[in-house]
Amino acid sequence: MKKFLSLLLTCAIILSTLLVPVSAASDATISQDTTLTKKFNAYQNLTIAPGVTLTTKMAGNEPQGIEMHGALTLGAGAKIIGRGIILMFRGSSYSGITLYYNYRGEFRPFPDMATAYERYHNAADYVFEFGYNDSIGGWVWKETINGGDPFEAPPALNSQLANSCAEALKALGLMQGIGTKPDGNTDFGLNNDLTRIQAVVMMVRLLGKEQEAKRQSWSHPFSDVPAWADAYVGYAYSNNITNGVSATEFGSDSIASASMYITFILRAMGYNDDPQKESQDFSWSQAPYFARNLGINLDDEQLAHFKRAQAAISSFYAVRATCKGGTLLSDQLIAQGVFTREQYETVMNPYQTNR
């Protein structure tokens, strides 16, 4: 019995060491040169004072880690150096430090976290891990990019196409700009990000339903929709074009991805992405690829750098695409009196062979 109790006590001690909780992330300010002594160092917000050096090191074969949940701020001349693998970011931001990523052997400065989440992974819980690289004296993202660079600025090669598409949609009454350029032309804001609220407004206009949306009273359950956009969101919600990011939030200021905007288009054209229905035509994540079969054909580069420009291009293609049931969206708009066939042919004929 004594041996059994001794064994039981030993197991309890071992189990208790395994169940010791990891320290919760908290705020900290480091005001003098410091070398980390713990394997795991979690911070909510970490500030390193000007001129101060924070050093990580290997403890035998065990690397040390700094895990950021909030903001990392380095004062002038402050730096983080070391040998451990890990400088981890979980949905956080940083300033005063340059992070790098390896693009085909070339070290390029890492963008801000918001851009990284949006363009590369589009998932708020994604963890970016950096390891210290002696050759450049800085922290490099652990993943190596061998395909197209998702962090590059949106290419200018589509700017002329996007502007032509936007002008054609404007001529048909399906799109408006955000202002007027100094030369008097419409400023469509093509290089700007597209928010969810802007995406819904563009979609309602693309369907020729703006006046109907404004004339009638629509309801929606979202508390974060500005008053000026109530009619647009209410119309889209009532017609199963859009949902919220939760039961009570629309996510008005969140950035719209290609999958999101093209899903709006496909739903408006009668296609179904509801997995609970036998008539499901596509899934949200595969929307851009399903749309290619309809002629709404954005390439991978355009999808990776989706902004108002790419929204204008996909909207333009949608007008010429076939809705579920076999009718062209343009024919539906003509039947609704949004524009005449003569107007449509005058505007669209120059593009018929440039799809």
Image (spheres, rainbow, N blue to C red):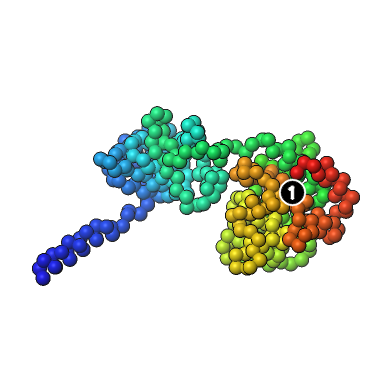
Instruction: From the top left corner, tell me how far across and down residue 68 is, in percent.
Output: 41, 47
Q: Nearer the viewer, residue 342 or 100?
A: 342
- SS for callout 1: helix
Is 260 on the left-hand or right-hand side of 16?
right
The residue positioned 57% from the left and 65% from the top of the image is 247
* Quadrant occupied by the N terminus: bottom left
* Quadrant occupied by the C terminus: top right
Q: Residues within 10 Å of mark 1 (few under 14, many from 20)?
A: many
Q: Nearer the viewer, residue 342 or 189?
A: 342
Instruction: From the top left corner, tell me how far across and down residue 157 is, in percent.
Output: 68, 35
The residue positioned 60% from the left and 37% from the top of the image is 153
The residue positioned 54% from the left and 45% from the top of the image is 120
Q: Nearer the viewer, residue 26 or 188?
A: 188
Q: Which residue is mark 1?
A: 317
Q: State the residue lying farthest toward the bottom.
A: 1
Q: Quadrant of residue 230?
A: bottom right
The residue positioned 39% from the left and 47% from the top of the image is 67
On screen, 271 above or below 128?
below
Instruction: From the top left corner, tell me how far across and down residue 297 is, in percent.
Output: 69, 47
Q: Amino acid at mark 1?
A: Tyr
Q: Quadrant of residue 325?
A: bottom right
